Image (tube, rainbow, N blue to C red):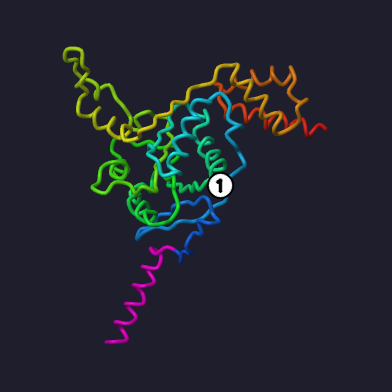
Amino acid sequence: MDAELTQRLLRLLDQAEAWLPPAAEPVDWSHHVAALWQRYPLGGRLVPVPPRDAMTMDDLLGIERQKRALIDNTRAFLQGLPANHALLWGSRGSGKSSMVRALLNSLSGEGLRLVQVDRHDLAALPLLVEQLRHVPHRFVVYCDDLSFEGNDDAYKALKSVLDGTLTGPPENVLLYATSNRRHLLPESMADNQATQLIGEELHHGDAVEEKISLSDRFGLWLAFHPFNQASYLDACAHWVKRLGRDDEWTDAARDEAIRFATLRGGRSGRAAWQFAAQWVGQARLTD
């Protein structure tokens, strides 16, 4: 009987092993500046990663006000001063995610550490934040391309960490998020039917209030809009010179950059970089 019980327990342990994360080594935050949060059914762990690239704030053109606001907010946080959680929202390819990467490259020497968490892992956000509470560094927890569907409850964990629990987020953690949606949740015509105008005041319905309440927890909103043609061409010129040589930005390159944006149906910093990569790469093939 004992042997049979032992075999059953061993089989059970073999099945449970797949649910356990690999043995994790502590992240050395004096050496690493960024990590990814990997969630497992029974917990999660931080995995250090090197910076993706050497992009700096000087590489981001046409968004000077947004750059300055985010740098100032982050520097205040790093110095132990009051600072806000930040929501970077707006059109696709306009530099939201690139700005966060450039921010890390610019301020890691001043003590900034970055932890990226996937939207699908937000249910474990309270656990992640609690792990960082007593670490002697200052962290921006970053979620890229954040949005929720109407039946998605993961946003409740985010609301709770931002401003909904008795303890609140620790003083060494800020949350930064990027999104194409200003209010992070989808908005429908039906939601707005309960909105009323009382006197000169606009009173939203409960559904709208619930959706706005999430984005309201971010104290710093930075809006990103499509480039006009002048800003787009400035970005194209910058990246052609950065990836190639100064003399490769010619009238022919300018005309081709305009055609490139027309075919893509929009102007953005991402489109400018993609054009420059194509233009310089093709030029190198024919050299």
Asked if residue 75 lies in the magenta stretch, the reply is: no
**Residue at the (65%, 27%) spot, across then down:** 275
User: Magenta region: which residues?
Assistant: 1-21
Q: Quadrant of residue 134?
A: bottom left
Q: Give percent across and percent down for residue 81.
A: 40, 41
Q: Amino acid at mark 1?
A: Gly
Pinpoint residue 179: horizontal percent, then vertical percent.
Answer: 42, 33
Residue 250 figure quarter: top right
**Dominant secondary structure, magenta:** helix
Q: Residues within 10 Å of mark 1 (few under 14, many from 20)?
A: few
Q: Position of residue 188 (x, y in %)?
A: 29, 25
Residue at 44% from the left image edge and 45% from the top image edge: 140
Secondary structure type for disc 1: helix
Magenta-drawn stretch contains 4? yes
Up-down relation of residue 178 to residue 134 (above or below): above
Q: Residue at x 58, y 45 (%)?
A: 52
Q: Nearer the viewer, residue 252 or 113?
A: 113
Quarter of the image with the N terminus in it: bottom left
Q: Residue at 46% of width from left, 64% of height from top? A: 24
Report the residue marked by disc 1: 109
